[in-house]
Amino acid sequence: MALAIIIMAAGKGTRMKSDLPKVLHLANAHPLIEYVLDTSYALDPEKIVVIIGHQAEMVKAATAKYRVSTALQEPQLGTGHAVMQAETQLKDFDGEVLILSGDAPLVSVLTLQNLIAFHHAQHAVATVLTAELDDPTGYGRIIRQEKSNNVLKIVEQKDASLQELAVLEINSGIYVFNAHTLFEALGEITTNNAQKEYYLTDVFGICFQSGKRVCAFKTENPNEIIGINTPEQLLEAERLLLKQYDTLKR
């Protein structure tokens, strides 16, 4: 099955206390997005689309050495809106779309290969990469059908009931979608929420309503799904990336 990859790289990263686009902050002398692009290339996709926004030209220049297309998200109206910007470039694409975050450099090629293989084996229209955290505070929770790979809903922390808050399995923000299902559902989502934004997770709601199968694939290494939002998280990512590199060298 053909694969296309969308990399979310439009964010400002306010908590980084810098005007530099979040994905261009350096981890061990390399911009965060380079790790994500190297991983993407290892999956041999037909197409890679990088969603750019804040300091767009700077991000475009930083990714110029890679064979990628860019799509501008301006203004930035949420994660669903970001993915909508890639639709023109993927309108004739028939296959699977993997969505990655440009600020999550630790996810491994093997985990993504396993995620995609699992997605195919389950005949799902969408599969979310998840992890189990001792402290899931701040993350969306994955509510599964009991003893099943099927997802019943993805609930944001602020909307979760006490029972749902007790769930330790969280949404990583990394997904595989059937391309047709993804863009059809994006056409149906609205900004009817507190932030007045298009949420990508609302696509799952559309799938649930129409009875389409959504699955969850859990990585055994929760460190892989860490996104970088603060200087402290960047330092931790540097340490983990060095450890990952040392392991590969052995």
Image (cartoon, grey):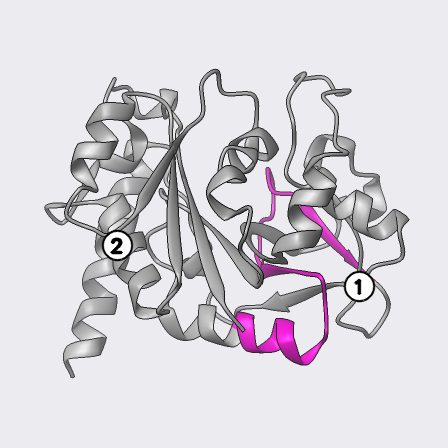
Indicate which disc, 2 or 1, sits on the residue closer to the N terminus: 2
State whether residue 107 is above or below residue 148: above
**Within-10-Å neighbours for mark 2: few <14, some 14–19, many 20+:** many
Q: Quadrant of residue 145?
A: bottom right
User: At 49% from the left edge and 20% from the top edge, which residue is drawn?
Assistant: 76
Q: Looking at the picture, which amino acid does disc 1 mark?
A: Arg
Q: Going by the image, does 198 lie left or right of 250?
A: right
Q: Which label number is shown at residue 213? A: 1
Residue type, mark 2 in image = Tyr
Give the farthest residue toward the front: 92
> Total of numbered circles in the picture?
2
- In-front residue for pair 122/67: 67
- Residue 66 placement (x, y as % from top left): 20, 51
Going 71% across and 34% down the picture, which residue do you hit?
187
Left or right, 95 with respect to 40, comes to: right
Please tell me which residue is depicted at 57% across the width and 34% down the height of the picture.
Answer: 84
| As drawn, 109 above or below 129 | below
Tell me the quarter of the image containing the N terminus. Answer: bottom right
Q: Which mark is residue 35?
A: 2
The residue segment tinted magenta is: 115-144
Q: Is residue 220 left or right of residue 231?
A: right
Please state the horizontal and vertical placement of residue 153, each as a whole percent of the image: 80, 50
Local SS, label 2: helix
Any mark on residue 66, and which? Answer: none
